[in-house]
Amino acid sequence: MKRTLKLGLFLMLALALFACSKGEANEGNNDGQGDKVTIEYWHVNAETQGGKAVNELVDEFNAQQDEIVVVPKYNPDMYKGLMQNLQAEAAAGKAPAVVQVGWSFLEYFSNNFEYSSPEEVIEEYFPEDDTYLTDHFLENVLSLAKNEEGTQVGIPYSLSTPVLYINKDLLKEAGLDESGPETWEEVKEFSKQILDETGKYGFYFQEPDDNWATQALLESNGASMITDGKASFASKEGIEAYELWADMVTKDKSAVHVSWDEGVQSFIDGNVAMLYTTIARRSQIQDNVNFDAASIKSPVWEGKDVRLPAGGSMLAITAKDEETQKAAWEFMKFLYSVESMATWTIDTGYVPPRKDVATSEDGLKSFLEENEMMNAAIEQMEGVVPWASFPGDAGLEAEQKLLDIRDQILGGDVGVKEGLEQTEEEINQILN
Amino acid sequence: MKVKSFVREVNWKAYILLIPTIIIFILFMFWPFAYTIFLSFYDWNMVSPTKEFVGIDNYIAVLSDPITFKVFKNTGVYILILLVINLCIPYVFAYVIDIVLKRWKSFYKATLFLPSVISLVVSSILFTWMLNPVSGPLALILQQFNIPMPNWSKLDGWAIAILSMITSWKVFGYNFILLYASINGVSREIIEAARLDGMPLWRIFFSIVIPMSSATGIYIFIITIVFGLQYVFTPIKVITQGEPNYGSSNIMYHIYHEAFVLYRTGHSAALATVMMCFFILLLIFEFRFVERSVYYEN
Amino acid sequence: MCTMKTKKGMPVFWHVIIISTIIILLFPILFALGMSFKPLKEAYNDTLNFLPIPFTLENYHALFESVDVVKITWNTFVIATIITFFKVVTAFLAAYAFVFLEFKGKKILYFLLIGTMFIPFAATMIPNYLFISKIGLGDNIFGVIFPQLSDAVGIFLIRQSMRSIPISLIEAARLDQIKQRHIMRDIVLPLTRPAITSTGIWFFILAWNEYVWPVLILKSVENYTLPLALQMFISSEGGTNFTVAMAVSVITLIIPLSLYLIFQRYIIGTFASSGIK
């Protein structure tokens, strides 16, 4: 027993020594870097979605100059996870230099965190770049990163839109047009026919923990999620649009009601014929399907214009002092170069926010020619609108209420009209 | 008397032995929790520079919210299911393998524990895939028999049942091993004597084995309740995020949800405090009534 | 007569029940193992067949390419070992004090400690984070370790096990003028070894798989632990790379599994020979 104890103690000592020496070695490294500025870049990109590109780009940036060292930090659980970590960091009085903020957190971020508008940073330290933003970004794209008060909170970094992925083989089997449905009314008919003819589910509408795709469905029918800071989705058009989806799930039973990952898995293995989800899933789908798959533009409502919320993220500067703010902008400028944007787009499947990337030879020209699935997303960029983000402190709670009612409606516990109207009322109460 | 004097003499030694534990708990448990109780009287979102004192408003809001009760009820259901799967069944298994069976004991012991080494994140990902109601392996097999699989992640009741199973998959083996070790320590002579007297096996189990292993039994009982609170969190977070409409959420997840999804720190803190009070009552009950009937060698 | 009958029919029945349980319990592990050697595309399209045909190492390649697996495994091992060791030692000392010594505030202190098992980690997370960053342990393995040490489960289990030791044994030792630390080391420690080993294994597994807290604390990839490496292949928006995730799981499994197989006999074996009975 004594021996075991001694051995244990010895082991502990060794480990403690190891840990200490490691700590020192790390500090030593920092000293060796001399007067370099070290900044942190917080991103959400898993290895399956751009993580490789982030590391590649950061390494390239660190190698090409010797004033700035960028340390990338991956935050699991997407923008929500990043926001959680940022919350903890802010409570400790610290902040990274550059953060990737998801569109649905635009209001929350700008209301609660300290940040510097890119315009401010440029004006103060980089007068030579004063036309950078307007030169390289489309007006409507830039305005995606403006909050309610009209401040430019960040710069759009990745854009996604929802598209309809179709399994052409199943469509053919069901005797349907292989080019897929163009309107939501057709989606419903297609879905029913697929169920009747093949016995497989016709459709899955993504159900993550946000209302992004729901917004696309409702607003394309002329509804509006938010009007003058108030929830307004339970309009006639909104209810009509939601009913189509709910009917497919609860009445026709041709659409499946499962979680997001399950739904995508079932599309990929050929058990669901059509999938409405983000273009960011492109590589997962393209790489793994065994059938003839295509992506087509988001369906429209008969005779109406499509309005698609932009998904993805912007980059915001949270650096606090001059030195790190400067470094942050240098790094961002590198990330927004045509070449970097191309690397980024190829690895993620997002639509580039910069004007000239898609057509440039250094950029994506050849990539887009080879990856037809991207085209649907790029073609529908004109219809892009900001992701509705409920204003004020209760914004996230409002978002949550809409998710709660989704489960009730699709579970058949409550009617669409009743459910949406009641939720709208509740949301407007808490927003006050 | 002898014991008493022995006791008085070594009083200070007890504190020495407890010092490391006390320091760690004060720094990383009691102080943070006291801070949480403090926050439960404020309206704050963790980042804004101002905290607004709101008195007991958070408690009123939390206690008048029907979701709180739904979540409490779910927690109860989780605990009940886990108690059946992770206390009753392993108890029987441990008894049967140790006393009733003669062969393959060590094989059973080793294999039943295996899933315990896997993390709940991994098992959540794994089971989401395997139990995909449309096209997972199980659904495909059921399809052969024309049995449709329910879309469990979106159905009240089913969601809790499946998430409990996933948690149990990990916990079962650990509980089993502990109970086995405990039953293994029950005197063989007593059991053999009872057998020779013609006492049926089920009676040996209930009137000899359970009472004599109840020190471990009570441990497993309490710890399974803790699992029902703390461990279920991971599958909820990875698989359902509390959906459908809080149908799979438990208190722990709800506290997390309030704090880190909605950023209502005050609500979350109030909920945590309410929950603590509830379980402290439960613990007092356990100390008062259950402990007495537990069999200890002394 | 009755016993004779039970003896013949029952074992077969129980063997069948137990073996089916084992199959249910082990199937997911085999499934994960098989999938980790399959191309992702095959995993999607031939999901019923969990045998790794066609066989591939590409998932492991992808993993080894994106992270330094050896370094990360070592980090995880160091963290889990330190946590396990400290938790077991402090729990043993505390349990000893609670069972064999009398002191003021014993009941209330025990009650408070056991009560902490019901405190949600979400309630202590932010204050702990503030404290850890204030003392400069952010992105440091000790920042990961410290808060995880405050866990009452070990005190509880080891105390339960110590209470089964006849107090007369301790008194006798005491009358023989045996010193406290010798009582602890030569009498109590051997008798509670099964409980200590099994809590130790459990603590190791928990610390080994912990992900919420390290995600918050650790920033640089060279400090990552295995559960964080797993998180790198999970993305709600881009989709989870299932087969690589399974490969990470298999690698994560190896060390706790071998430790269990080594220590398994101690947990159970020592009970019979412990001399309690």
Image (cartoon, helix red, strand yellow):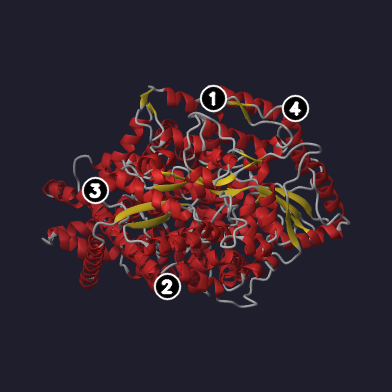
Contact, mark 1 vs mark 3 (Cβ under 8 Å): no
Which residue, given by chain and number where applicable, does mark 2 sit on?
Answer: C258
Residue B192: where, in percent of width, then height?
Answer: 46, 66
The residue depicted at 29 percent of the width and 48 percent of the height is: C132
Q: Is residue A424 visible?
A: yes
Residue tagged 4: A236
Q: Earlier in the sequence, mark 4 or mark 1?
A: 4
Provide the secondary structure element on which disc 1 rests: helix
Please state the horizontal and vertical placement of residue C51, each as a whole percent of the image. 63, 74
Q: Please state the chain letter of the residue tagged with numbered disc 3 in the rendered image.
A: C
Query: Residue at (61%, 46%) from the top-left corner?
Result: A208
Q: Nearer the viewer, mark 4 or mark 2?
A: 4
- Tag 2: residue type? Ser
Q: Amino acid at mark 4?
A: Lys
Return the chain for callout 4.
A
Looking at the picture, tell me which residue is in the foreground, C114 or C61.
C61
Q: Are marks 4 and 1 on the same chain?
A: yes
Which numbered circle lies on residue C135?
A: 3
State the SS at label 2: helix
Q: How far is mark 4 from mark 3, CA to CA?
A: 57 Å
Q: Is residue B196 visible?
A: no
Q: Amino acid at mark 1?
A: Ile
**Residue situated in front as seen by the camera: C115 or B258:** B258
Q: Is residue A135 left or right of residue C197?
A: right
SS at mark 4? helix
Amino acid under disc 3: Ile
Q: Are marks 1 and 3 on the same chain?
A: no
Marks 1 & 2, CB-CB < 8 Å contact: no
For marks 2 and 3, give the CA distance: 36 Å
Q: Nearer the viewer, residue B218 or A209?
A: A209
User: Spatial distance from mark 1 to mark 2, Cα to Cα?
Assistant: 54 Å
